[in-house]
Image (cartoon, rainbow, N blue to C red):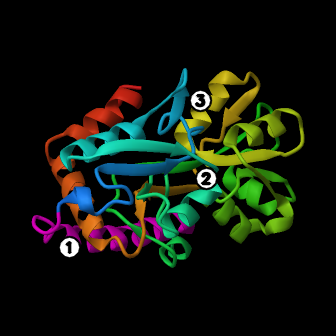
């Protein structure tokens, strides 16, 4: 799986750069004066990506929300979450409307042209959902055929599939749930999406299954405006401390138990 190896290597390089920056983050301006609105950490997300972000009633919860909230607390900031279309997150961060984008977001070369990323805090897998009994039995079959693939617009599933099979075979949707609905209705032959949301969608929709072969492996990180280097350093330092003291692992374990 060349795609898996190349993406791990690319993220490893970015992560090493982030750790180097984090080492000098212990001093400088108070974090409260480094954000869009003093005293707040404004986070842009797309809250339809369980277990990383989703609604419980009218409240956004999940892995990303809890990690960002803990980062904000440790920096003496109040977290404010804005739920927007996924494809608008980088643009909003780039324009200075939001401090961070945190939405199960993968580091890619294209995104690095627009924003900076923190060190990774979680690992994700791109999985393929098909109908039970589908003639698509593995990723190679999917890529080699003329099947139509549903993706959430602007995600890495969109980017990778467009590169591998061409735009003419990719159907884009604003939400992952809309892509899955299209699969159940026969409008697409498969859906490529991160594994944890994929599992939730399959559990909620009878007659669907996830292929046993993964499409890609990638790491998740927060994105920041390229001018926010000091805030980036402070967040990297905080993430490193949260990793060292077990906070990040505990948050992930709460939503994705290691015992299944």
Precedes in sequence: disc 2 or disc 1: 1
Q: Nearer the viewer, mark 1 or mark 3?
A: 1
Q: Which residue is mark 3?
A: 200
Q: Is residue 96 left or right of residue 207?
A: left
The span picked out in magenta is: 1-29
Q: Nearer the viewer, mark 2 or mark 1?
A: 2
Alpha-carbon neighbours of circle 2 within 10 Å: few (<14), some, or many (≥20)?
many
Q: Is residue 28 magenta?
A: yes
Q: Quadrant of the N terminus?
A: bottom right
Residue at 57% of width from left, 66% of height from top? 91
Number of the label disc, if any, that sits on residue 20: 1
Mark 2–mark 1 Cα distance, whole angstroms, equals 29 Å
Say what secondary structure mark 2 lies in: helix
Q: Which residue is mark 2?
A: 86
- Kindly tell me whether residue 162 is visible in this rendering: yes
Q: Position of residue 10 (x, y in %)?
A: 43, 72
Alpha-carbon neighbours of circle 3 within 10 Å: few (<14), some, or many (≥20)?
few
Q: Position of residue 172 (x, y in %)?
A: 77, 54
Question: Label 2 near label 3: C-beta < 8 Å?
Answer: no
């Amino acid at each position: 799986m060349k795609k898996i190896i190349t993406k791990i290597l690319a993220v490893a390089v970015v992560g090493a750069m982030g750790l180097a920056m984090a080492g000098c983050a212990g001093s400088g301006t108070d974090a409260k004066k480094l954000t869009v609105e003093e005293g707040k950490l404004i986070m842009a997300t797309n809250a339809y990506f369980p277990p990383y972000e989703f609604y419980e009633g009218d409240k956004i919860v999940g892995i990303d929300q809890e990690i960002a909230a803990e980062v904000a607390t440790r920096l003496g900031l109040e977290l404010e979450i804005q739920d927007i279309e996924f494809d608008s997150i980088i643009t909003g961060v780039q324009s200075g409307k939001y401090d961070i984008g945190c939405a199960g977001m993968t580091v890619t070369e294209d995104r690095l042209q627009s924003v900076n990323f923190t060190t990774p805090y979680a690992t994700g897998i791109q999985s393929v959902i098909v109908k039970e009994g589908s003639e698509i039995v593995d990723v190679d079959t999917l890529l080699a055929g003329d099947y139509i693939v549903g993706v959430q617009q602007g995600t890495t599933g969109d980017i990778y599939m467009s590169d591998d099979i061409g735009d003419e075979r990719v159907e884009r949707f604003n939400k992952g749930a809309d892509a899955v609905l299209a699969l159940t209705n026969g409008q697409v032959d498969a859906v490529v999406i991160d594994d944890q949301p994929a599992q939730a969608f399959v559990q909620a929709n009878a007659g669907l299954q996830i292929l046993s072969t993964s499409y890609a492996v990638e790491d998740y990180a927060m994105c920041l405006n390229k001018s926010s280097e000091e805030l980036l350093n402070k967040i990297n330092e905080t993430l490193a401390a949260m990793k060292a003291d077990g906070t990040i692992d505990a948050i992930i374990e709460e939503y994705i138990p290691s015992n299944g």
